[in-house]
Amino acid sequence: MKQKIFIIAGLVLLVIVIVIMVRDLFSSKKEDQKNPYDYKLNELKKTAGKQIAYNEALSFRTGLEEIHAIACGAGDRIFVGGSKGVEIFEKDGKPAGKFGFEGFASSLAMDKKGDFFIGMQDHVEVYSPEGKLLKKWNGISPESFLTSIAVSDSFVFVADYGKRAVYRYDHEGRLINRIGEKDPEKKVPGFIVPSPYFDLAIRYNHELWVANTGRHSMEQFSYDGTMNSAWGEASMAIDGFCGCCNPSHFAFLHDGSFVTSEKGIERVKIYSPKGEFKCIVAPPSAFTEGTRGLDLAVDSRDRIIVLDPERKQVRIFVKK
Amino acid sequence: MDKSRTSYPVSRTLYFVHRIIPGLLFLLLPLITLPIQRFPKPEFESAYTQPQTFIPTPRAEFLAYLDVFVLLISLGVVTWLVLKKRSRLWVFFMSLFSLAYFGFYREGCVCSIGSIQNVSLALFDHSFILPLSVLAFFLLPLIFTLFFGRTFCASVCPFGAIQDLVAFKPQPLGSRLNTVLGIIPYLYLGLAVLFAATGTDFIICRYDPFVGIFRFNASFGMFLFTGILLLSGVFIARPYCRFLCPYGVLLNWTSRFSLRHLSITPAECIQCRLCESSCPYDAIDYPVTDKSPESRPVMVRKMMILTLLVPFLVLIFGYAGSRMQDTLAGVDARVKLAKEVMALSRIQDAGYGMQDESFEIKAYKASGKTESQVYSEASAVLKKFYFGGWLFGGFTGLVIALLIAGRMLPVYRKDYVTNKGRCFSCARCTDYCPIKS
Amino acid sequence: MPGRREFLNTLMRGGILAALGLLSGAVIFRSRDEKSCSYGFDCSGCSRSKSCMLPAALEARQMVWQLDMTKCIQCGRCATNCVMSPSAVKCTHAFAMCGYCDLCGGYFKPGTKTLTTAAENQLCPTNALKRKFIEDPFFEYTIDEELCIGCGKCVKGCGAFGNGSLQLQVRHDRCKNCNECSIARSCPAQAFTRVPANKPSLLRGLGPELPKETAKKNQANG
C-alpha cells in the first residue's frame, strides 16, 4: 500500500513536470509586454493643439537611397540632395529632373544664377543648373563633414561639423576666414556640436546665423567672426530646445522669423525674429519615432518644406 | 549631503578603467579600435584623456578543449571503475566529481544532451558553426557507450549524479509503466531535433531542470520546476534520465549493441535472486524460462500483423504529425510575428486606430521589413514544419510499433541480466551479487 | 545462435559508428561556407585565399552571444530575462562616440530643470551611470557595472537625443554563454546573435579594427 502511494506521488509529480513543459512550449501567450524600465517621452511629446498653426498640405517621396539636404530655388522648385545625386521637384511635387554624381551630398544651396553648391562630406562641389560639374573645391580635412552651406551675393558659408567651424569663402572657393572658434576676446564661446547636425543660414541677405546645438543657442555673427547676439534655452518644454543638442536645422521666413527643427523630440517650430516662441509647425506625432535630420527650407510663399529622411519624403506645411 | 561624493564617485569600474586596463591592453590589442570620423571627440583643453572602452574577453577557447579532455578522462575512468573494478562506491565518488566539474564549475553548458540540438541545427543551417568541442561532447559518450555501455550515465553526466543523490525511496514501476513512460523521451528527442533543425528553439536547454541549481541562480518558477522533478525523483529514481532525457534514447540504442557491458555477476549466475530488487531503475531483466515456445502458426500470424502494423502506424502518425504543422510552427518566433503582423493589418484595414503595440510589432516596424517579407519568412518556416511534422510523426509511429513488437515477440532468458538499453551502469547490483570473482 | 547474435551486434556497431562518422563529416563539411567564416565575411587580413575551402568548423571557433544594437529597441527584457540576476547584459559606453554633453539624454530624466547629480534627476534606476565634470561644457559619463542591470533606459535616452554612445552589450566576463540564450529567445527584435569568441563585441562607433600589421607593430612597441 505504502509502495503504491509512493509510486502514485512520484508519477503525479512527473506528470506535472511534463504538463508544465508542454503547456509552456505550445502556449500562445505573448511575452510580457510591460517594461518596468520604460523611458517615457510621451508626456513631453504632447502638444497643445491650439499651438499648431500649420497644416501638412502636401508630401511626396524621393527616389534617392538616402536623403540629407533640401533647398528651395527659383520658381519655388525643390531640390533634394542625398546619396549619389540631387533630385528636382516642382512646387507641387512633380519630378522636374535630377542629376547624379559619385558621393554623398551632405548639404546643398544655390546662388542667384541657380548654380548648385554641394557639400560632399569633406569638400564643396559646384554644379551648373543642368547638373554639370563646374568646379571642385579643395578638401578641407579628412575629419570634415559639411553639414550646411549658405550662399549670399558675395560669399559662401560652410558649416563643418567635423572641425566644428564655419568657413567663409568667396564664390570661387577661396577661403577668407573662419568664424565662431572659441575666442574669449571677441566673446565667442565656441561651437559645441556633439552630434552631426550643425546648421547655418543667412537672414535678410546679410545676417549670418549658426545653430550652436550643444549650447542650445542660435548665434549671430559678423563676417569677421564677432558674435553679435544669441538666444535659445535648453528645455524639453515646447518653447525650448530639447536634448543634448538642438536645433538640428533651421531656416528663415520672409519676415525674419526662425523655423527650427529638433531631434529627440521631433518637432518643427517657429520663433519670432527676436527669438520668442510663436507656434508649432509640426508636432512630434507627425513624425516616426527616432526621426532625425529634418532639414528645412522655405519658399517664396512662406510654405515650410521639411525633409523627412525616415519616411524618405518631402513634406510641405502651410499656414492654417 | 556630501556633494563632492555624489558628484565625483570613484567607482570600482573607474578604478578598473584606470589601473587594470593599461595592464590588459596588451591582451586586448585586437579589440582596440579607432574612433570613426562621424563622431570626432570634443576638443578638450584640459589634460583629459578619453578612456578606452573596456571589452571583456570571453572564456579562453583552450578551456573548451580542457573540458573535452576532462570528459574523455572521466569516461575512461568510470568505464574502468564499472567494468573492471565493479565498485559502486568508486562510481559514486566519480559522480560527485562530475557534479562538481560539469555541474557546478562548468554550470551545465554545454552538455552532451543539449549538443543534440547544436548538431541538428548545424546539419540544416550551414551558417551555424558547430565548434569541434561541442561535436566532441556529442560523440564521445556515444562512442564509449557503443563499446562499454552507458557508463556516461553512471557518473559522468551531472544530471544523473544530482538525481542519484535524491533517490531515497525508489519504487519499482513494473514493465508496462516503464514501457509507456519510456515513449516520452522519444517524443522529446523528436521535438528537440525538429525545433533545432528549423532554427526555432533549443527546447532541451529551455527546459533544462538542473541548470538553475548548478548556477545558484534562477527564477522562482524555474526552481519550482526543478523542485517538483527532484521530489518526484525521491520515489521514481532518475525520472529525467528514464522518462525525459532525449540523449538517453541515443545512448539506449547504442548501448544495446555495446561490445562489453556491466554484468551483474562476474561469473555464472547462481539464481540467488539477491540482485532482484537492487536496481532502482527497473533495469534488471528477470529470467523467462517457463513460457513454452509458441507454435509456428501463431508466430507467423504475429509476424504478419507486425509487418502490417509498422508501416500503418508510421503513416498514420506521420499524417497526424503533418496536421500538427500549425501547432508546431506556432512555437517559432518568425511565425508568431507573422501572426501578429496579420492581426495588426486586419485591425488597420477595419479602420480602427492604433492600439498599444507589442514590442515585437515595434521591433518589426523599426527593422524596416515589409509585410510580405515577414509573411514569406513565416511561410518558409511553415513549410519546413510540414515536412518536419511528417518525419516527427512517422518517427513516433515507428517507435510505438517497435515497442509493440518488443512486447509481442517471445523472449527467453536464463539468468538475471541487466537490460543493456536501460541500464545506467551504476554498478549497484554488483554489490548485491554474492559472487565476487 | 549466440554466434549469429554476436555477428549482428558487431554489424550494428559498425553501422552506428559509420553513421556517427557520416554525421560529423556532414556537419563539418557543411560549415564550409563563406558566411560561417570566423573572420566574418571580411577576407582582407585573412591569410587564406578568397576561395577558401577550409570548413569553418575546423577552425574550432567557440561562439558567444552578442547583442546587435542596430536592431535593439530597448524593451527592457535584457534586464528581466537573463538566467543571471542581475543580467549579464550591461550598458557599455563607447567613449569615442560620446559628445560629453552637459544635458545628457541618457543621464537625466526627461524634463529635468537643474542639471545636477541629485538622485531625483537621474534616469538610471540604480544610479549606475556616473557623471563627472571635465571642463566647460563637457562631462564624462561612466558606468558602474556592479550597479548596472542592463535595462537600457539610458541607452534609449542617449539614442533619442544624442549619438547613441551608450549601448547594451553582453559582458562576457559575466555571461554564462548558455547553449541557448534565454534573452535571445524573448528578444522581440531578434537582435541576439552568436559571434566568434575572438570578436566578442558588436559595439558600434569604435570604427574598424586596426589592420593586423598595425596591431603587430603596436604589440612590438608596447
Image: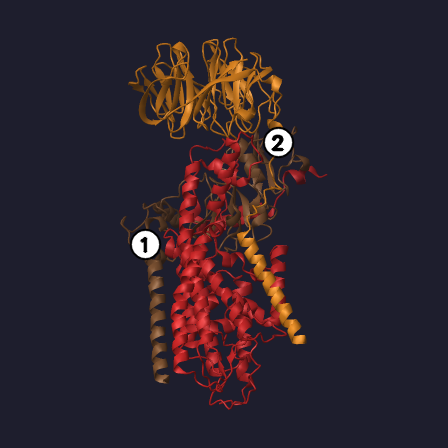
Chain colours: A orange, B red, C brown
Query: Could you tell me which secondary element the residue under label 2 belongs to?
Result: loop
Q: Earlier in the sequence, mark 1 or mark 2?
A: 1
Q: Residues within 10 Å of mark 1 (few under 14, many from 20)?
A: many
Task: Tally the marks.
Answer: 2
Give amino acid for label 2. Answer: Pro
Does B46 sit left or right of B126 as displayed? right
Q: Quadrant of the N terminus of chain A?
A: bottom right
Query: What x and y, as percent, mark residue C120?
Result: 68, 36
Residue C19, disc:
none
Query: What x and y, as percent, mark residue B217?
Result: 60, 57
Query: What x and y, as percent, mark residue B376?
Result: 40, 42
The answer for how far apart the CA atoms under marks 1 and 2 are is 50 Å
Does A303 sit left or right of A7 as displayed? left
Can residue B136 be seen in the rendering of this structure?
A: no
Subunit bearing disc 2: C
Name the residue carrying label 2: C110
Foreground residue, B340 or B73? B340
Give amino acid for label 1. Answer: Arg
Q: Quadrant of the C terminus of chain A?
A: top right
Name the residue carrying label 1: C32
Query: What x and y, as percent, mark residue B305?
Result: 41, 71
Question: Is residue C141 positioned above or below C16 on the image?
Answer: above
Tags 1 and 2 in contact by the CB under 8 Å rule?
no
Residue visible at 54% across and 82% down in the picture = B429
Foreground residue, A162 or A302? A302
Q: Residues within 10 Å of mark 2 (few under 14, many from 20)?
A: many
Subunit bearing disc 1: C
Question: Is residue C9 positioned above or below C40 on the image?
Answer: below
